[in-house]
Amino acid sequence: MTKTLVRAARWSAAHPWKAIAGWFAFVALCLGAGLSVGTHAATTEDYRIGEAGRAEALAAEGGLEQRAVEQVLITRAPGAGGGRAVDGPEARAVAADVSARMRKLPEVRSVSAPVRAADGSALRIAVTLKGAELDGKKHVEPLLAQTREAAAGHPRLRVEEVGGPSISKGVEALRSTELARTEKIALPVTLITLLLAFGSLAMAVVPLLLALSSIVAAVGLSMLASHLFPDAGVGTNVILLIGLAVGVDYTLFYLKREREERAKAPGRLDPRAVVELAAATSGRAVVLSGLAVAASSATLYLADDVIFSSLATGAIVVTLVAVVSSLTVLPALLAKLGERAERRAESRAARRAAAGTPTNSRRSGRARTRRWRGGRVTEAVLGRVEKRPAVTLGAATLLLLALAAPLSGINLTDMSRETHPRSIPVMQTFDRLNTAFPELKATHQVVVRDSADHADEVAEALRALAREAEPDPDLAGTSRVRVSPDGRITLLELPVPHHVSTEEARSSLQRLRDTYVPRAASALPGAELAVTGDVARYADYPEHQKRQLPLVVGALLLVTFLMTVWAFRSVVLALAGAVLNLLSAGASLGVLVAVFQHRWAEGLLDCTSTGSIGSRVPLFLFVILFGLSMDYQVFVLSRVREAAQSRLPARQAVMAGVRRSAGVVTSAAVVMVTVFASFAALHLIEMKQIGFSLAVAVLLDAFVIRLLVLPALMLLLGEANWWPSRPGRASATNPAERPLAHVG
């Protein structure tokens, strides 16, 4: 691997303009190819999970699948007078106007008769759209436009529209606005961080430029990949989230090493030779890190869920593209910047010589040594770790375990519509609709498949079920039985006057599945029954994730273990790495539970607690955190291994490697925390939870695991770190150990 990396770096450094042009041509090609084929979006069938998914498939078989529905709500306008009641000629005229407008639209499948609220405060008109349920948000704009026009003509009444499609449209608009604001915050802060790390605007711009171009290329490639793994609409989000973090990190690893090697031999190595050295050392670490992140992300495919498949695809694509950029175009940019720096150094030296000012090489040498040994705070911390490794390991481990403790009480739920922020205007209409018509909050659907000859018997059994459930206060409302045209599929709808996230709604689902449906099934021998609906979807998804979690975590531990063994030929380090990654991920998830399941941080984080964690959040975080932890682990261990190969004693090798990597790990952590913390400012609760937890995880991993736990553990293990192999002295064929004139 190392020889290949060095050869690639040598060519890139020798032909910088070709390499730079080639990279941007590659980015344009990826984006162009993606745009030309488009994105293959996930369909309704791709989202079907558990019993709810099985019931939906049965309903779709008979043409009774759930459709996209919009509700036009007519209420008295604030300050209009006349009380709350909506009646009389004006209300009837508005209802007739809205109905006529909607029926003319080609996107509309059907329009219901107006329904009055029990207290007379509102009218509603249900408008069903054509096509699949998921496609509703693509076609809802004409309906919204007609609703706005109807409202403009009747100022005394408030005419507004709400439904799954309009809510999805509102959420997407908020997400786009907030992501744009996040970029405006994250990019300048990242640039300032890099400027402080390098002291050069040109060197600071390079990581950011490569990260952004990698993101653009990854977006195009993800469009191509969506034809194998359908896109659930979250791929671009994860590409932005992970791409900016790892793209900057990998470039940072490379840049820091190039500057370090140049500082060790000022003026004695030409820029191309320095770039080759960086490729032979940090280039290898970047490849190993990228492969580790990609392999970790790939375990999400085992979740058997279209959303996680989409997340995995985005993370893998952007990580691998970031690796390619750091190993191809980056050497060319570094070579050009190195030549520029060399010319400037020669000019300064000539000016000093002309002025008769001597060069204080001893002082500059001490400054260079301090620069790659680490800062004062890092030195102080590592000094204490070196003196008392056992105490440090014990104290840091107890801290991480304490932070992880709340994880035992985690409450996983699917984030339903009522959790969306009320800053989305349509969500305010959502609240008014559910207040006036509580029966619309949720619905159970009992689906039965039987032979067409038994259609009447099935329908009667379902009506008997509805009569039996009628006294149940959590199933109050008017039920409805529908039969497919071929008579094989029958569906019973039972309104639920509670939001799907409430205990009442979930307990009603439990009673329906455990009591009412089994009784109905006893009267229908040979029939297939299943329950779906809003509550069932909400309940079945977290249960599916819980079942898949052991499989994904087991695969994740195995993958990271094998990757570490392959990279460092050490079973001990692989086991230690897996344990440390578990500690880091567990602690960050514990903090997430402590913060978001309770209300004490609502003001601080500008959110309303749902008393739960999004069902997708822990699994996604667990996998991504393992991948990012491997980033730092590979880089730190690579430096320790280099020190051990130079025949330093075990303790000295550990401390030398940690000290030499501390600066770049700290800089990379600051960049990652900046990116992730900006996502924690979003108002969408799942994105907020993901951003917050990732920021906490990076802080813990960089400043507790890599500065305290890992060096303390390696100091205690000594030579056993490398069992069953020994690092020994680097082979004469290792480019990092040979004279630069012969590298390759």
Image (cartoon, helix red, strand yellow):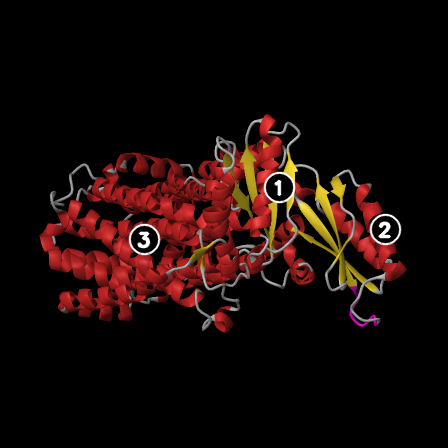
Q: Nearer the viewer, residue 536 or 620?
A: 536
Q: Which residue is mark 2?
A: 97
Q: Which mark is residue 629?
A: 3
Label 3 crowding class (10 Å Cα cut-off): few <14, some 14-19, many 20+?
many
- Residue 616 colored in magenta in the image: no
Of marks 2 and 3, which one's residue comes earlier in the chain?
2
**Element type where label 2 sits in the image:** helix
Q: Residues within 10 Å of mark 1 (few under 14, many from 20)?
A: some
Q: Is residue 415 left or right of residue 363?
A: right
- Residue 351 seen anywhere in this rendered image of the structure: no
Name the mark nearer the viewer: 2 or 3.
Answer: 2
In the image, 718: left or right of 396? Answer: left
Residue at screen point 80% across, 72% down: 79
Magenta residues span 76-81
Q: Which residue is mark 1?
A: 66
Give amino acid for label 3.
Ser
